[in-house]
Amino acid sequence: MPQRSVVGALVVRARAGDQGAWDVLVERYAPMLWSICRDQGLDRRDIDDVAQYVWMRAVEHLGRLRDPDKIGAWLATTTKHECLRVRRARRKQDHSEQLLDVAMTMDDRTTTIEQVVEDAERDAVLRAAFARLSPDCRRLLGLLMKEMPYHEICRRLGMAMGSVGPTRARCLARLRADAALVALMRADLESREGEHHV
Amino acid sequence: MSEVWDDEELLARLIVALTAADAVPRDFVEAGKTAFAWHNIDAELAELAYDSGLRQDEEAALLRADSAALRALTFVAAELSIELEITERTLIGQLVPPQAGRIQVLSESGYSHVAAVDEMGVFVLNEKPPEPFRLQCRTVTGLSVSTAWIRF
């Protein structure tokens, strides 16, 4: 899948010392690290500690990743492990039964790492495609996503009432034309068809 | 052209993606970027210059009586020293000259932990790492120093 090789290329560039490539990787996966830590019920201080450790290990690990395309999976697994370690340490520190209960509940509703990584990759592709749209399209879709009424959108953007619908359609068509998004939707279609045929 | 996601689904997924990113504090993301400073660090090895555990004299006895420290260690590199006090439960460190930075604790077993060093050059580890371990320090001034392996 093309979006995967984008990641692989970023890893290779970061490995060679390119801070800019590293920054893109951090922007891409920071929401995933954040949500894994939140799902584990960590507070902000612990989240910061876990993330700092994970990023640092990743930086040291760049040259040793067997499959650079899979850095997302590596980050997710390492984050999860580190969260569990911090939680164990916290539990030892204070023996509150209540805390233990909360921690157990958290564990029950966490999704599998594979699912977390897949969601993160998909979200990243969508965000990147959205970022490549024209400012006008981003503004319009942004307001539509906030479920703002059409007449209010027209007032804000100085558009005629009748042009919101067509413009919305044109902006979404442009979004759909994004190469990485096309590949993502195709892969999703194939997996859905696969499910039906099984 | 297969429309696997219709416009509504596409918008819904976009909302999820953008909301997930918006929920993340900016400083959290920026902190991740600074981790790149650890890329290819070529840390200078700080030599053990003082170890209270090796002294049975009055000074070591005083140290034990005076503070909660069970042992004090000093590691010296060309431009930076790392002073360590190991107590019953914690590890307290002081960089000399004082400066902010980050400390990474690495154990032979693979354990790793990161702690911030404040502007006074102080760092505190509330959890004793498994032995043996070493400290790798990187300061905001760009110094990079690693200690030898330490055992309690």
Image: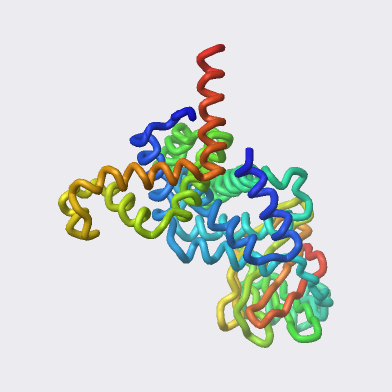
Q: Would you say residue A91 is visible in this rendering?
A: no
- For residue B27, side relative to residue A135 (left or right): right
Q: Which residue is drawn at 41% across and 50% down?
A: B18
Q: Among all residues in the image, which is located at the extreme left?
A: A151
Q: Would you say residue B46 is visible in this rendering?
A: yes
- For residue B37, side relative to residue A143 (left or right): right
Relative to residue B52, is residue A84 depicted above or below? above
Q: Picture quarter containing residue A12?
A: bottom right
Q: Picture quarter containing residue B4?
A: top left
Q: Which residue is drawn at 72% across and 79% down?
A: B143
Which x, y percent locates residue A36? 50, 45
Which x, y percent locates residue B57? 80, 81
Relative to residue A9, is residue A21 depicted above or below? below
Looking at the image, which is closer to me, B71 or A53? A53
Q: Among all residues in the image, which is located at the extreme top?
A: A198
Looking at the image, which is closer to me, A153 or A3? A153
Q: Residue at x 49, y 30 (%)?
A: B1
Q: Picture quarter containing residue B145?
A: bottom right
Q: Residue at x 34, y 42 (%)?
A: A169
Which x, y percent locates residue B49? 82, 80
Relative to residue A146, is residue B49 depicted above or below? below
Which x, y percent locates residue B66? 62, 80
Point out the image quarter for the C terminus of chain B: bottom right
